[in-house]
Image (tube, helix red, strand yellow):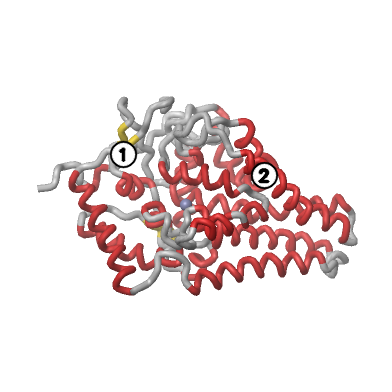
Amino acid sequence: MFEKTISDQTVKFKSTPKKDEFVKVLRKNIHNYFEENNISRHANGEMWLKMVISVVAWGSVYALIMSDILSPYPYLLIPAFSLLGFTSVFIAFAIVHDAVHNAISSKRWVNRFYARFFDFVGGNSYLLRQMHGEHHKWVNIHGIDVTLETHGLFRFTPHEPWKPIHRYQSYYIPILYALGQLHWVMFKDFKWFIGEAHIGNRKNIKHPFIEYVVLIVSKIVFYTVTLVLPMIYLSVSWWFVLICWMSIHLLSGFAFVVVFQCTHIYDGTTYPMPDGEGNIENNYALHVLNTTADFSRKSRIGSWLMGGINIHVVHHMFPNICHVHYPALTEILIETAKEFGIEYQENVKFKDAWKKHWDMIAHLSKPDSTVLEYNDGNDLSVAAA
Ligand SMILES: [Zn+2]
């Protein structure tokens, strides 16, 4: 067991000329792709259609529930609420994630507008932008990657101090993954707004007053629409609506968490730590290739439903590009990486990504587990000739 913390140091990525050359060539190849095909990096027709479908899907399921025709069949009402949860996650995957990365449009207000859909489905888009942005910057770096920060509840990195409870994390993690979304809509946003002054490597953050107002108003709207109105208008008892409301979040919440977790926490990833001067032994692109794996990249339906989050390597490198372009860009990435002898990690099928995720969770449950901090298999540490 060993413990490392990052305290207040400034963390930066250290490169070599050859690593920089890889990034330069990759950027040029990606740039050429858009130039030669004369297409925008932002949303295309397919993306706009998907955005419409996701909102219509949510509205249709909600209308079905509120029509009260399912109320005589409680065993159908619970799956209907659960489906509402999946359509909410679909909105988050298909619209919100791109919007918080300014990938839908070149116009800032357009992205801000669509990001607000997250507030409508129970989250907070302002906080998501802050937290997800810090995760992007410091992926898999213990202490500043916010997605690894669990106050000791989980051991997602070998740098997390081991506690006896972690021995059982393979058993309790699936349950807590399923409760993650419920926790998010009820507590997480308030906790980070009120109880924390840091996000990732940023300290003493002061949130704009207007965002507190949006937080309160949007939570009131969310609870009114999904809980209070069904309690008033459905012909079932209030406590049954409460059970239905909780079922919005369980299965879809589990799916939401697993999709993200499989991309960074898996058997084969690395957990780099900065040296005494705050340097990470890689440039950012190589760091991503060390710590991130795609899955089900060629599944058109899967990628469509997951908003391209399964095609995560190229997403981390070019987060401002709309996800509909990821399959083509990943081919370019693979080709370029091959030229430089750089490993690109992927799992062809979801079941492989899933297994590797749980293998890592089981591995980290042991007090003496270690994981590579840096995979130097790429041999790019030498200066270019
Ligand atoms: Zn992202």
Residue placed furthest toward the left: 385
**Three-letter residue code for mark 1:** Phe
Image position of 311 with respect to 142: above or below = below
**Callout 2, which amino acid?**
Leu
Give me the residue at 43% from left, 25% from top. 7
Q: Residue at coordinates 41% horizontally, 60% vertically from top-left?
A: 321
Q: Is residue 117 visible?
A: yes
Badge 1 density bin: few <14, some 14–19, many ≥20, Cα 10 Å? some
Q: Is residue 53 above or below residue 8?
A: below
Q: Quadrant of residue 274?
A: top left
Position of residue 212 measured from the top left corner of the image (x, y, whole percent): 66, 40
Give how far across and how far down residue 193 sits, in percent. Answer: 62, 36
In this figure, which residue is indicated by the disc labeled 2?
215
Residue marked by disc 1: 13
Query: Residue 1 appears at what percent x and percent y?
Result: 42, 26
Q: Give the distance between the C-alpha atoms of the residues marked 1 and 2, in whole angstroms.
A: 34 Å
Helix, strand or loop at label 2? It is helix
Q: Which residue is more in the foreground, 33 or 18?
A: 33
